[in-house]
Each structure stands twice: as structure tokens, then as C-alpha cells.
Image: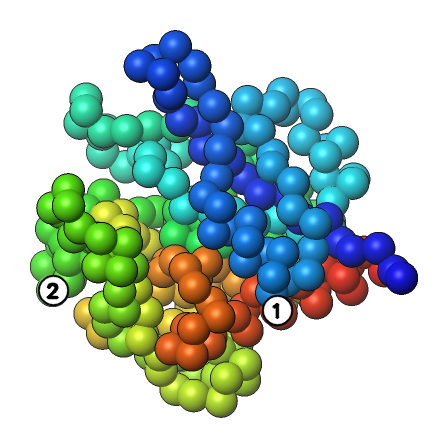
């Protein structure tokens, strides 16, 4: 039996045990979705890895998944206004991901961005971000429920429609013009990065999905959380995305 492709998952730095330990972690749903629907072997990429060693990792994997995260990309990476003092940050992830993305692109490696991942790809291509989408004129509140007792079903519930652009990859993938997605983000794309294409917009005009222009492999990034129950009928687009990403990784491996 042929060996499976290996996919590197970007991790976040999480503080545990009342500050006594910093861990590299990612959500189990990302790992589970890759195993079940992409048919790949997932590994975690620690965000504190030295820059010189990133190339060595990329020699041994066949795709990269950029996950969501609690912290936002720091604004100095795209010329934005300084964050408030209490804003969560993850500088090691910023450094690692903004180094990995152009290296992946140079290798034409499959790359899949989810939530923070779409923002990272946009910044790496010279784009900018809104700090708080809901504070922009004409934009909806795309954040998750603010109450601490919100259930997972409430947090990840389907929230709004996205409309696919002309010639969108999604139209070809599912033969539809729109879809309903969840929404858990505060930041969002403002100025689109160079050499990126818009694949979908939300009803308020916010960019919800992008791809890299003329990229020979899978290069899709989405603003919603595609890893949340892709097996459910109402989330079949997300299942298709993980399946397509896995096929691209297998092709890259061969």
C-alpha cells in the first residue's frame, strides 16, 4: 500500500499551569479532519522552531495547514495601528508562518488556510487586515458569541451566507453559487495581497475566501472554521475542501 502524504500543522503557543509552561498546540478538530477526510499523516510544527530549520521540515512534508488561533497577527507586519496592551499576541507563530508561507509557495506545495490562516496568507502577500471588522462601516459582527457559557454548537453554528465570485474554485467544487458558513473572527481582510484572488465574499462584502493566482496546486484559504464537523450534510463544502487538499498533497508527494 502506498504511503500517505505528510501534512504539517501550524501550532499556537499556549500558556498552561498558571504560566509555568508554554505549549505548542492545535485543535483536535484540525487533526481529525485531516486524518478522516484528507487521508494524510498530520504532524505538528512548533512555532518556536529556528528559522534555519524550517527548510528542513518542508523537505519532508507534502502540504501545510494554517490553523485558526486566539491571537491575531501583529499589525507591524502589515503597517497597521498598534494593538491595545491587552490584545493577545503570538509573535513566534507570526514569525514562523510568515516565513513558511513564501517557502511553501516557492515549492508550489499545497497550502490550506483556515480563519487566522487566511489572514496570514494575505499579510504574507502584502495585504492588510481590519483590526475589528464589526467596527467598520457597513460590516457585520463576525465574532463568536461573547457570553462565557456559550456552547460549542452556539459558537460554531452556521451564521451567514457567502457568495462565490465569478470563476470561483468553489463553484466548480460544489456546483453552487453560495453557501452558509460559521463565523468566529474579529479581524478580517482589508486590502487584498498582491497575486491573490477573491473566491468568496460575505453578504457585507468582507472577503471570506482567497487563492493564489495561477498556483499549480491547492492554495485555498477560508475565513470560517472549515474543520468543525465537515461530515455533517450542511458542511459538505468543508468536507470537499479537506478531500481536495488531501488529493493535492498526494499528487505533490508523487
* Disc 1/disc 2 C-alpha distance (Å): 35 Å
Q: Is residue 61 left or right of residue 184?
A: right
The residue singled out by tag 2 in the image is: 138
Query: Which numbered circle lies on residue 127?
Result: none
Q: Is residue 48 depicted above or below 74 in this figure?
A: above
Query: Which numbered circle lies on residue 243?
Result: 1
Image point (72%, 39%), residue name: 58
Residue 112 visible in the picture = no
Q: Is residue 28 depicted above or below 223 in this figure?
A: above
User: How many other residues sit within 10 Å of disc 1, few (<14), some (14-19) or many (≥20)?
Assistant: some
Q: Where is residue 168 in the image (x, y as percent from the top left)?
A: 48, 78
SS at mark 1 in the image: helix
Image point (11%, 64%), residue name: 138
Of callouts 1 and 2, the N-terminal one = 2
Residue 84 visible in the picture = yes
Nearest to viewer (mark 1 / mark 2): 1
Q: Considering depth in this image, is 16 or 213 the residue closer to the camera?
A: 16
Q: Quadrant of the C terminus?
A: bottom right
Q: Is residue 159 depicted above or below 80 in this figure?
A: below
Q: In which quarter of the image is residue 210?
A: bottom left
Q: Position of residue 3 (x, y in %)?
A: 84, 55
Image point (52%, 77%), residue name: 169
Q: In which quarter of the image is the N terminus?
A: bottom right
Q: Is residue 68 left or right of residue 109?
A: left
Amino acid at each position: 500500500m502506498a504511503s500517505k502524504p505528510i501534512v504539517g500543522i501550524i501550532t499556537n503557543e499556549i500558556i498552561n499551569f498558571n504560566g509555568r509552561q508554554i505549549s505548542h498546540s492545535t485543535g483536535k478538530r484540525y487533526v481529525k479532519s485531516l486524518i478522516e477526510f484528507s487521508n494524510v499523516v498530520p504532524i505538528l510544527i512548533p512555532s518556536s522552531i529556528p528559522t534555519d530549520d524550517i527548510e528542513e521540515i518542508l523537505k519532508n512534508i507534502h502540504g501545510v495547514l494554517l490553523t485558526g488561533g486566539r491571537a491575531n497577527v501583529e499589525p507591524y507586519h502589515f503597517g497597521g495601528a498598534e494593538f491595545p496592551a491587552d490584545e493577545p499576541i503570538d509573535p513566534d507563530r507570526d514569525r514562523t508562518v510568515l516565513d513558511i508561507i513564501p517557502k511553501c509557495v516557492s515549492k508550489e506545495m499545497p497550502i490550506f488556510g483556515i480563519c487566522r490562516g487566511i489572514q496570514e496568507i494575505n499579510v504574507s502577500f502584502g495585504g492588510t487586515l481590519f483590526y475589528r471588522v464589526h467596527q467598520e462601516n457597513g460590516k457585520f459582527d463576525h465574532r463568536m458569541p461573547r457570553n462565557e457559557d456559550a456552547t460549542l454548537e452556539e459558537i460554531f453554528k452556521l451564521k451567514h451566507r457567502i457568495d462565490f465570485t465569478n470563476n470561483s474554485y468553489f463553484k466548480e467544487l460544489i456546483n453552487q453559487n453560495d453557501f452558509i458558513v460559521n463565523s468566529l473572527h474579529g479581524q478580517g481582510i482589508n486590502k487584498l495581497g498582491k497575486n491573490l484572488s477573491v473566491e468568496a465574499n460575505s453578504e457585507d462584502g468582507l472577503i471570506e475566501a482567497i487563492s493564489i493566482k495561477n498556483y499549480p496546486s491547492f492554495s485555498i484559504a477560508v475565513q470560517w472554521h472549515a474543520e468543525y464537523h465537515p461530515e455533517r450534510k450542511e458542511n459538505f463544502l468543508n468536507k470537499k475542501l479537506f478531500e481536495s487538499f488531501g488529493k493535492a498533497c498526494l499528487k505533490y508527494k508523487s
